[in-house]
């Protein structure tokens, strides 16, 4: 889906966190307020009353959904950004899929993209006589990873260039880029990249470094710039996603095109995790999980299927409360050995919330496997309920739920 990860020799960047976490952030506390309230709300919406109201809205929508509609919220299916395939759209609609990913490349501009998105939103499920809007995402990072371009869209420089800017300039620029996405109907960006690629590895890092997708080569550079990028998007009312947890900076192969991608370096205390932890403290709403294996964190599972990574490190250690989205587990070579249905079940069982597949034709098998596991396991069904609530909470923040 994106330029991305294989076995790597030894690393130069494996150190315990050398400085206090907040010293590397763009002041996480100052960003938290930007993320906390719904995009459509005023300053008072960050208070307890607004939080209770939002939770009540989510519970109301959840309660009115059918079981099939709830399961559909767990999926994000790929649609070509320039020329959507009606048959794939029909699959998304049939299985009540709650989110779409605009894939490929489009040079048609904001208005043409908005027309496509409007058509997709018109097919979204209605619950209690109100449509539950789709989360519409894309990869708008900059440089060689910018899905949407053309009239109305800026040409974004690579993250490596963005990392040379002041954080103020980057935040202001990101706010403009987010407004452009919003004008095109996109409400979720699968960015920023928070991976730290060591300078000694550089472009030999296939998923990130080869495409200049990193903000820099140290946590001290990446952290404030990934925070600034995300804060600019939050300022303009577009959700952001920090990726690819727990980091693809120390690998050589690309999980999209390579099997058995292994990071033998990163631990739960590596400095390369600081950008992720800082983003979480700042209130980032989405975290994307990598499909590599981290032998010093969980040698037995790829991160996307690892309870140790998702429930342990991300949820318990770092305290993340938002939506955990998978990297592509549709077309990615890294997961080809796992049957599609098992991919979805294993990700959700590990603590993930939203399955991303750039190939929507795999969704029927995935949905049926999830429903079968729900029928067998009350514990899994409870995990599904929690995940649906997390996704709906994100939608509420994006102004996609209608209550009252």
Image (cartoon, helix red, strand yellow):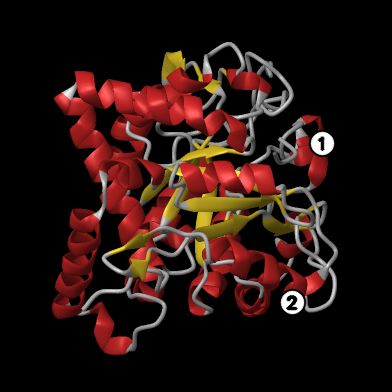
> Which tag, 1 or 2, sits closer to the chain's start?
2
Q: Is residue 4 above or below residue 27?
A: above
Residue topped by disc 2: 111
Q: Is residue 117 above or below residue 319?
A: below
**Residue 268 image-quadrant placement:** top left
Q: Is residue 210 visible?
A: yes
Q: Is residue 358 above or below residue 330?
A: below
**Residue 214 badge:** none
Q: Is residue 139 above or below residue 174?
A: above
Left or right of 316 in this view: 160: right
**Residue 252 image-quadrant placement:** top right
Within 10 angstroms of label 2, few (less than 14), some, or many (20 or more) residues? some
Residue at 33% x, 75% y is: 37
Q: Quadrant of the image for the N terminus?
A: top right
**Residue 203 badge:** 1
Q: Is residue 303 visible?
A: no
- Residue 169: horizontal and vertical position, in percent? 67, 78
Numbered disc 2: secondary structure = helix
- Residue 222: horizontal and vertical position, in percent? 60, 54
């Amino acid at each position: 889906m994106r330029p991305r990860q294989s076995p790597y020799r030894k690393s130069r960047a494996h150190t315990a966190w050398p400085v206090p976490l907040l010293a590397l952030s763009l002041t996480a506390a100052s960003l938290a307020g930007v993320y906390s309230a719904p995009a459509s709300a005023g300053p008072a919406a960050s208070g307890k009353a607004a939080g209770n109201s939002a939770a009540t809205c989510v519970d109301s929508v959840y309660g009115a959904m059918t079981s099939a509609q709830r399961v559909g919220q767990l999926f994000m299916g790929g649609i070509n950004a320039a020329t959507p395939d009606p048959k794939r759209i029909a699959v998304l609609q049939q299985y009540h899929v709650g989110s779409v990913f605009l894939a490929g490349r489009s040079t048609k501009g904001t208005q043409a993209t908005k027309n496509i998105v409007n058509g997709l939103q018109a097919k979204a499920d209605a619950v209690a006589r109100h449509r539950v809007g789709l989360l519409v995402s894309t990869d708008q990072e900059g440089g060689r990873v910018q899905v949407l371009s053309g009239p109305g869209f800026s040409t974004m420089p690579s993250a490596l260039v963005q990392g040379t800017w002041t954080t103020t300039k980057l935040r202001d620029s990101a706010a403009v880029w987010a407004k452009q996405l919003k004008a095109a109907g996109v409400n979720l960006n699968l960015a920023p990249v928070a991976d730290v690629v060591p300078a000694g590895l550089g472009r030999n890092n296939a998923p990130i470094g080869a495409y200049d997708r990193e903000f820099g080569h140290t946590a001290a550079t990446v952290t404030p710039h990934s925070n600034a990028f995300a804060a600019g998007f939050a300022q303009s009312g577009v959700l952001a996603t920090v990726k690819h947890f727990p980091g693809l900076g120390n690998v050589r192969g690309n999980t999209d095109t390579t099997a058995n991608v292994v990071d033998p370096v990163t631990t739960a205390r590596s400095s390369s995790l600081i950008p992720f932890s800082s983003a979480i403290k700042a209130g980032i709403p989405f975290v994307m999980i990598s499909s590599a294996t981290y032998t010093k964190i969980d040698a037995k599972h790829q991160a996307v299927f690892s309870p140790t990574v998702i429930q342990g490190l991300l949820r318990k250690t770092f305290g993340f409360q938002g939506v955990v989205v998978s990297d592509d587990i549709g077309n990615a070579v890294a997961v080809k050995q796992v049957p599609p249905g098992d991919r979805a079940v294993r990700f959700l069982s590990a603590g993930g919330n939203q399955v991303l597949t750039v190939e929507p034709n795999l969704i029927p098998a995935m949905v049926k496997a999830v429903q079968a596991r729900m029928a067998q396991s009350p514990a899994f069904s409870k995990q599904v309920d929690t995940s649906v609530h997390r996704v709906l909470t994100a939608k509420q923040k994006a102004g996609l739920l209608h209550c009252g």
